[in-house]
């Protein structure tokens, strides 16, 4: 991308994120955590971010909200540079960090969930409604007066997520948002994200490709480099790319491939079972 495109994004273009040749090295580190990373995310896109441990995903997340400053390249979020305007950028981008404890600061759960809204100056009555709604959405009703440090890992992750959902920023960046959740909790969170599709821009970091079956695109970060920017369908069909990046396709996709069906077409075992039954019925007719 050239500088003029960057200017276009700054002046209200539809780019939520644009980065060009982004590079970052932690102090005293022999290998850059990110190098030469270029991609764009349009407003309203749902973009997955995957890759092996140490690939650079969380570093990218920290750069997006200005917690770290790039030492190479350019990055714009909602048309602004998070390194120089972090406060402004954080009005548009909400981040769920990989370690939920890092975001929990208030004495009681309800204050933590309300924290982002308070910063935005939302009126008290409206704030109470949004906090209650977000807590219900993550299954935390009744936890209002609990002290965050007394919660289990998954409960802490739910609190952090409720804080993000209460604000509903334009851009949601979620770093492994379901890593500590039970199976039903994971499904509820994924449904909630799905409901925000199109309305919000979503960057969803995960180790589980099945969570990204509906993503518009999936970015693969490995060794600090962006090695792929693909649709789920193309990524799931590229065995070499999957293997090189320690990615395992969902069971449904593997079954579909084994049956000679398109791997990204079926999102659930039930959908695939329906297709197999329909095929069998046609053959035996
Ligand atoms: N605070 C730090 N100081 C020094 N090096 C760091 C720091 N944080 C991360 N790194 C290094 O930077 C690289 C990228 O780490 P990062 O946390 O971005 O990876 P990741 O893709 O999020 O991995 P994971 O899947 O394990 O969460 C790794 O080599 C890691 O060891
Ligand atoms: Mg990480």
Image (cartoon, helix red, strand yellow):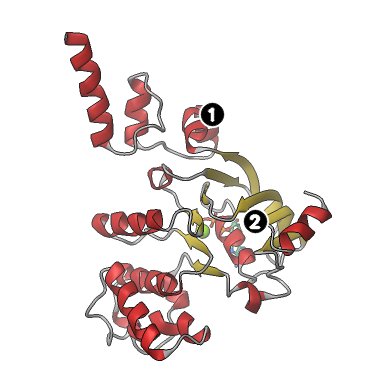
Placement of 208 over or under 251, stated as above or below = below
In the rendered structure, the answer to whether residue 41 lies left or right of residue 198 reads: right
Question: At 68% from the left edge and 64% from the top edge, which residue is drawn?
Answer: 26
The reply to whether residue 64 is in sight is yes
Placement of 212 over or under 168, stated as above or below = above
In this view, the residue farthest toward the right is 3
The reply to whether residue 32 is in sight is no
Indicate yes or no: mark 1 CB to ligand 1 under 8 Å. no
Q: Find disc 1 in the rendering and name its residue.
A: 240
Q: Position of residue 279 (x, y in %)?
A: 25, 17
- Circle 2 packing at 10 Å, graded few (<14), some (14-19), many (20+), is some
In the rendered structure, the answer to whether residue 278 lies left or right of residue 244 reads: left
- Helix, strand or loop at disc 1? helix
Viewer-proximal residue among 92 and 242 = 92
- Helix, strand or loop at disc 2? loop
Q: Position of residue 143 (x, y in %)?
A: 25, 80
- Circle 1 packing at 10 Å, graded few (<14), some (14-19), many (20+), is few
Q: Find disc 2 in the rendering and name its residue.
A: 14
Q: Quadrant of the C terminus?
A: top left
Q: Quadrant of residue 267?
A: top left
């Amino acid at each position: 991308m050239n500088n003029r495109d960057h200017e276009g994004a700054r002046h209200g273009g539809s780019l939520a994120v644009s980065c060009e040749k982004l590079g970052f090295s932690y102090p005293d580190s022999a290998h850059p955590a990110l190098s030469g990373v270029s991609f764009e995310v349009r407003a309203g896109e749902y973009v997955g971010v995957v890759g092996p441990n140490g690939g650079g995903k969380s570093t990218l997340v920290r750069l997006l909200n200005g917690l770290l400053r790039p030492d190479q390249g350019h990055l714009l979020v909602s048309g602004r540079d998070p390194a120089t305007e972090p406060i402004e950028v954080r009005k548009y981008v909400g981040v769920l960090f990989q370690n939920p404890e890092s975001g929990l600061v208030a004495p009681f759960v309800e204050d933590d969930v309300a924290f982002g809204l308070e910063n935005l100056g939302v009126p008290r009555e409206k704030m109470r409604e949004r906090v209650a709604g977000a807590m219900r959405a993550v299954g935390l009703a009744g936890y209002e007066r609990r002290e965050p440090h007394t919660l289990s890992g998954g409960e802490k992750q739910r609190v952090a997520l409720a804080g993000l959902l209460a604000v509903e920023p334009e851009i949601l960046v979620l770093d492994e948002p379901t890593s500590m959740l039970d199976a039903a909790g994971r499904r509820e969170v994924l449904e909630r994200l799905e409901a925000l599709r199109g309305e919000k821009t979503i960057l969803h970091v995960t180790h589980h490709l099945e969570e990204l079956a509906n993503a518009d695109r999936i970015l693969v970060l490995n060794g600090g480099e962006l090695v792929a920017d693909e649709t789920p369908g193309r990524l799931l069909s590229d065995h070499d790319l999957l293997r090189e990046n320690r990615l395992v396709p969902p069971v449904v996709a593997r079954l579909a491939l084994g049956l000679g069906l398109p791997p990204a077409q079926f999102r659930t075992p039930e959908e695939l079972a329906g297709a197999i039954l329909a095929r069998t019925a046609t053959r035996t007719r």
